[in-house]
Amino acid sequence: MIYFIGAGPGDPELMTIKGRRLIEEADVIIYAGSLVNEQVLAGRKPRAAVHNSAYMALPEVIEVMEAAEKEGKMTARVHTGDPSIYGAIKEQMDALDERGIAYEVVPGVSSFVAAAAALKAEYTLPGVTQTVILTRAAGRTPVPDGESLKELAVHRATMIIFLSVGQIENVAAALAESYGWKTPAAVVYKASWPEEKIIRGTLEDIGEKVKKEGVKKTALIVVGDFLGSDYELSRLYDPSFETGYRKASR
Ligand code: SAH
């Protein structure tokens, strides 16, 4: 059996109880060494075989899984954050389907929610935006037509940009056309790690600030008026608003 496990954003305590148990039980562990905090593997069996997928291409990963399967061993495939977000998990699941190998997916805390926690922010403020866009700038992996930052910016929703801090100045310029240069922006580096860093600014100055701090990778760019202080109170907790659980008080 193969378990794909979302190991969370970095802090080993931000892994699910199920994910931790499966890592403790695994005979074979394949982890994304470029981003996964090795401490999440601390509870593994002393004899567990550990592979760092940063050094492996897809066929090698599948070979390791297939070999383990033949020996009746359990494999934990450990991804950073949640595997559904830029995790390249689908190609692995498809390869396992082709071979008739069973697997399960255990979700994890994605870095974009860890970033909200670090910022002490709410992405969906009433009267500001009710939409969150997760995206990336085109890099070595292109972005399909209709999904350029410029086109997505038109919505002025909360935007969270992965894998793109190295191009922060281009990103800010692409967004500014619709959001305006004064829109708040932040960069969260290594959310939940001891070396976490938060850089706050506006689309106008965030590029410069990030360059000054020397942040080049493992960071999210978050943009939108949710970072400001203007919003409406929620209906959910409005005393005059009835819910299925609570009668209106006036
Ligand atoms: N599956 C992961 C994302 C993998 S893509 C998730 O759910 O978080 C790798 C990108 O994620 C990095 O380039 C960076 O943009 C972001 N990232 C991953 N961990 C991060 C962290 N702890 N803090 C900030 N950004 C992080």
Image: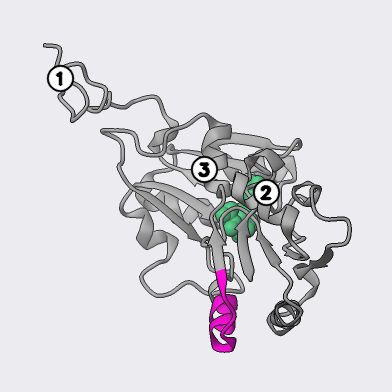
Question: For the residue marked with disc 1, what is the amino acid?
Answer: Lys
Residue at the right extreme, as displayed: 46
Secondary structure at numbered mark 1: loop
Disc 1 to disc 3, C-alpha distance: 32 Å
Q: Is residue 184 above or below residue 93?
A: above
Q: Which residue is mark 3?
A: 113
* Residue 115 in view: yes
Image: 238 above or below 91: above
Q: Nearer the viewer, residue 250 or 168?
A: 250
- Would residue 57 appear left or right of 232 to someone viewing this image? right
Residue at figure coordinates x 63%, y 45% from the top left: 15
- Report the front residue among 178 and 4: 4
Label 3 amino acid? Val
Residues rendered magenta in the picture: 91-103
Q: Residue at x 70, y 68 (%)?
A: 74
Q: CA distance from mark 2 to mark 3?
A: 19 Å
Q: Mark 2 or 3 closer to N-term?
A: 2
Disc 2: which residue? 20
Quadrant hosting residue 68: bottom right
Q: Which residue is mark 1?
A: 247
Q: Earlier in the sequence, mark 1 or mark 3?
A: 3
